Amino acid sequence: MAFVECVLVELTHEDVGAEYRSSNAWGAKIDQYVAAEATGQQFIKRRYDERLGWDETQITREAVRDKLVWQLSRSESLATNRSHAKPATNPDTFVVKPTQQLRTDSGCEEY
């Protein structure tokens, strides 16, 4: 997906991070991706799960690409999946923003 490749280039060359937010019957989730080094081959993935809190791992560019392609190419948001008795109603969102604006606290008040 060309869009994801453009995002990866921006993450490598600018002080920005990508953030994918979703919610489901079990609560809110946030995935954040920030370049870990200048070559753009390693990224930091921060994940927030409403039940578990924040976790941070280092992953490869390929893993970020695969995850973003999967998240952004789904025909249906997990948030509106009607397979649960009480599905979430907020749509999934994706943004690229300055790294200082990425949240590292629970940051899910808007969910």
Image: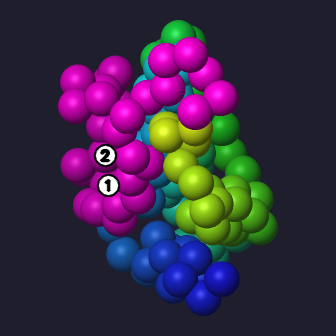
Q: Camera-side residue: 53 or 78?
A: 78
Please tell me whether residue 28 is drawn above or below residue 57 in the rendered image: above
Q: Residue furthest bottom?
A: 2
Residue at x 23% of width, y 24% of height: 109
Residue at x 29% of width, y 62% of height: 97
Q: Label 2's element?
A: loop
Please tell me whether residue 8 is drawn above or below residue 44 in the rendered image: below
Please tell me whether residue 60 is drawn above or below residue 51 in the rendered image: below
Q: Label 1's element?
A: helix
Horizontal and vertical percent position of residue 94: 41, 58
Identify the mark at residue 102; answer none if there is no mark. Answer: 2
Horizontal and vertical percent position of residue 76: 58, 54
Residues packed near mark 2 inside 10 Å, few (<14), some (14 to 19) or many (20 plus): some
Residue at x 64% of width, y 60% of height: 74
Give the quadrant of the C terminus.
top left
Identify the mark at residue 99; answer none if there is no mark. Answer: 1
Horizontal and vertical percent position of residue 87: 49, 26
Q: Residue furthest top?
A: 51
Please tell me whether residue 20 is drawn above or below residue 27 in the rendered image: below
The residue type indicated by label 1 comes to: Thr
Is residue 95 part of the magenta span, yes or no? yes
The residues colored magenta run: 82-111
Q: Are marks 1 and 2 in contact (CB under 8 Å)?
A: yes
Note whether residue 38 is visible.
yes
Please count the marks in the image. Answer: 2
Note whether residue 32 is visible.
no
Q: Quadrant of residue 1?
A: bottom right
Q: Is 86 left or right of 55, judged from the image as shown?
A: left
